[in-house]
Image: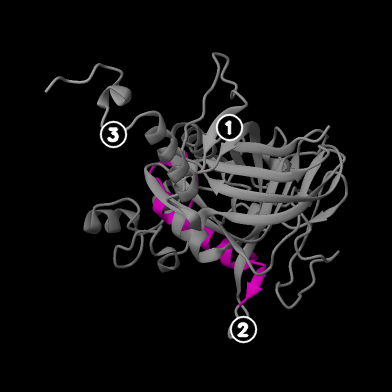
Amino acid sequence: MPTGTIGLVITGWHHALHETDDPKNECSTGYTAGDYTNAEAQPDHAELRRKFGHPYSRGPNGELTNYSPMAVEDPIPPSELTTRTGYGLNLDGTADGKATPRTCAHAKFASPEGVQVDNQLARVVGCTKGWRKGGFSDAFYNEEIYTNPVNRILIEITGVDDERNDPQVEVAIYKGEDRLTRDPAGKYIPFLTQRIDARFPEYSTKLRGRIVDGVLITDPDPDATARLPIRWIAKVAERRIRDLQLRIPLAGSWPVAMLAGYEDNKIWWNSQKAHHIAMPAAQNSPPSQYRALMRYADGYPDPKTGQCTAISAAYRVETVRAFIAHPETPQQRTAAATMVHARCPCSDPAGLHGASAIPS
């Protein structure tokens, strides 16, 4: 039965990490040491804190680690992923991660199903406790997806003839403006109206795709960069992702609903440094994290330096069905105004207000 249009709203957003109950299965030395732990281990920490008055002013001239990550090196070696198993998509089209005109050489992950995939950002955050399942950063951000409409991301699939198999569909991603609603059990309520936020057309992305065995699969557009808004801990930023691809189950099975592509290094870091929390709960250390970002970046090399300017990233997303409401066009507004005027002439205010006309 043709459905025509399918609307989705994202209700959850997590780094696509392959995790087991024991982090040492993925990170041989356990979780990476956070900023505060590294500060205390720094030999000149007491002197720097006495001089500059802040525990994270760890640079020689009091530089904060999140804004000047190269000013200091962490005294505790960072823990990084040692597992070869991971989630992601094959973004570069190679089987071995060799360099191509738009990628740098890198080691791929093997998905649990044995598919070679790209997700180098997992190597940057995969041993950070805050971004793993149940971690502070992951939990805080996902609560803000619920509480703040800045994080409202809508997906609209049009031209759908069959939800199980359709060789050609159009997909649009928008910023929404409405809140999410949960039932008493905490589950998101589907099929509510979500309006597109017309104030931010820059957050609109168009993709082409298909539905295979009930799974939406989109094709990358190498000429487009998707921009997605973020609000996290009272800071507003955005993501910029090239070659954006979606794998979302609609009426079939897929290991995880996924959004993947090459995320711009500078934009990603700008959002991270703005959101860095000066407290042990964050469990990340900017000097080590920034170095890892530069080391593992594998997308879109700078033609002059050869340094890749983007990093392959995969996110596990959660969605519920929604009705996507488009803003009225000028023609629709004119037609609506004409209908109101036809029902209620301006000379008769009683028609507008439901009360008898005021006598002269």
CA gap between label 2 and label 1 equals 40 Å
Disc with the residue nearer the chain's start (1 vs 3): 1
Chain-order first, disc 2 or disc 1: 1
Q: Of 254 and 349, which appears nearest the observer?
A: 349
188 sits left or right of 251 in the view = left
Residue located at (35% from left, 53% from top): 56
Which residue, given by chain and number where applicable, does mark 3 sit on? 346
Q: The residue under label 1 is which amino acid type?
A: Gly
Q: Nearer the viewer, residue 162 or 360?
A: 360
Question: Could you classify mark 1 by the number of other residues whose Cα lies within 10 Å: few (under 14), some (14-19), or many (20 or more)?
Answer: few
Residue 134 - label: 1
Mark 3 or 2, nearer chain start: 2
Q: Marks 3 and 2: CB-CB under 8 Å?
A: no
Residue tagged by mark 2? 303
Q: Is residue 306 magenta?
A: no
Taking depth in this image into account, of 155 and 288 the one nearest to the observer is: 155
Vertical comparison of 231 with 145: above or below: below
Instruction: Please provide percent x and percent y for residue 116.
Output: 83, 56
User: Pointer 3: residues within 10 angstroms few (<14), some, or many (20+)?
Assistant: few
